[in-house]
């Protein structure tokens, strides 16, 4: 799959000592559950059972800790999607991305997209390095959809990728902000229609799976 050739993240997570690992795990839980701006480094250190000095020694700043949290979550989601596609060969890969999202939201993302939340919380600080990680994650999603659409036989793969990304992101937001519990399922159905339409109007060949 072409997406595996891309860099796993736009932010390099430092080599982690056991204390730093505990701090990053705690930061991941707290930042996602309470919000980046609402959680202080002291709270992360306390939850991890380490000193604040340990956190700063390894991550240097709260900004770097936020970037490490987002980068690691990004890497995990990329791996989740790629594994899901590989393990479900009976499903067209474009649609398998939505199945992977549905499973991820149930298992690891009940509050919605961590990157959308982070972007909203950091709007007043456009210089924050986390924006690079956030943008990189969304670009990866777009490129993944584009490559999978191209592999499926879609000539206008870039245009379809933008539409699929809108569905993917919209489903994430609707899942966490409304009572529409099947938002991802609805998005998948719409994605199937878009895929079939793209293949019918300008594709090289139509996939036989559904």
Image (cartoon, grey):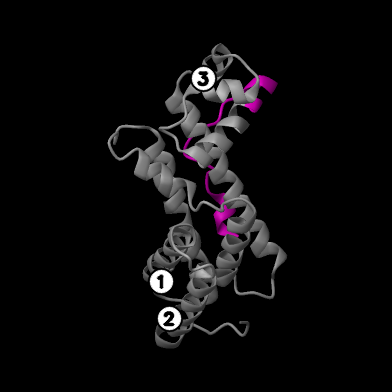
Q: Quadrant of residue 156?
A: bottom left
Task: Tell which tag, 2 or 3, sits nearer the viewer.
Answer: 3
- Secondary element at tag 1: helix
Contact flag, marks 2 and 3 (Cβ < 8 Å): no
Q: How far across and how far down the image is residue 68, in percent?
A: 52, 32
Residue at the spot 53% in from the left edge and 41% down from the top edge: 33
Residue 138: horizontal and vertical position, in percent?
43, 52
Sequence-earlier tag: 2 or 3: 3
Residue at 39 percent across and 39 percent down: it is: 132
Q: Residue furthest right?
A: 87
Question: Is disc 2 placed on a helix, strand or loop?
Answer: helix
Q: In front here: 81 or 172? A: 172
Q: Tag on residue 42?
A: 3
Tell me the crowding category of disc 3: few under 14, some 14 to 19, or many 20 or more residues within 10 angstroms, Cα based.
Answer: some
User: Can you say whether 181 is above or below 63 in the image?
Assistant: below
Residue 201 visible in the shown view: yes
Estimate the spatial distance between the alpha carbons at disc 2 and disc 3, rounded to whole Å.
51 Å
Location of the C terminus (image quadrant): bottom right
Corner quadrant of residue 80: bottom right
Which element carries disc 3, helix, strand or loop? Answer: helix
In front of the other: label 1 or label 3? 3
Inspect the magenta stretch and tell me whether residue 17 lies in it.
yes
CA–CA distance between discs 2 and 1?
7 Å
Residue found 47% across the figure and 29% down from its top = 39
Please report the bounds of the magenta region as a residue range: 1-22
The residue identified by callout 1 is 160
x then y, percent, for residue 146: 46, 65
Q: Is residue 113 magenta?
A: no
Q: Quadrant of residue 167?
A: bottom left
Alpha carbons under labels 1 and 3: distance apart: 45 Å
The residue carrying mark 2 is 198
């Amino acid at each position: 799959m072409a997406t595996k050739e891309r860099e796993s993240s736009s932010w390099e997570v430092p080599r982690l000592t056991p204390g730093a690992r505990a701090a990053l795990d705690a930061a991941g839980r707290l930042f996602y559950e309470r919000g980046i701006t609402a959680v202080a480094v002291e709270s992360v250190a306390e939850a991890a059972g380490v000193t604040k000095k340990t956190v700063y020694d390894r991550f240097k700043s709260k900004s770097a800790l936020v970037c490490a949290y987002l980068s690691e979550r990004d890497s995990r989601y990329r791996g989740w999607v790629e594994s899901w596609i590989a393990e479900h060969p009976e499903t067209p890969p474009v649609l398998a991305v939505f199945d992977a999202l549905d499973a991820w939201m149930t298992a690891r993302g009940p509050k919605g997209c961590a990157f959308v939340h982070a972007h909203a919380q950091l709007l007043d600080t456009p210089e924050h390095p986390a924006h690079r990680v956030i943008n990189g994650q969304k670009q990866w999603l777009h490129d993944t959809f584009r490559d999978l659409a191209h592999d499926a036989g879609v000539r206008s793969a870039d245009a379809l990728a933008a539409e699929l990304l809108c569905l993917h992101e919209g489903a994430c937001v609707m899942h966490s902000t409304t009572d529409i519990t099947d938002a991802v399922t609805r998005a998948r159905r719409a994605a199937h229609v878009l895929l079939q339409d793209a293949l019918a109007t300008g594709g090289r060949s139509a996939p036989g799976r559904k």
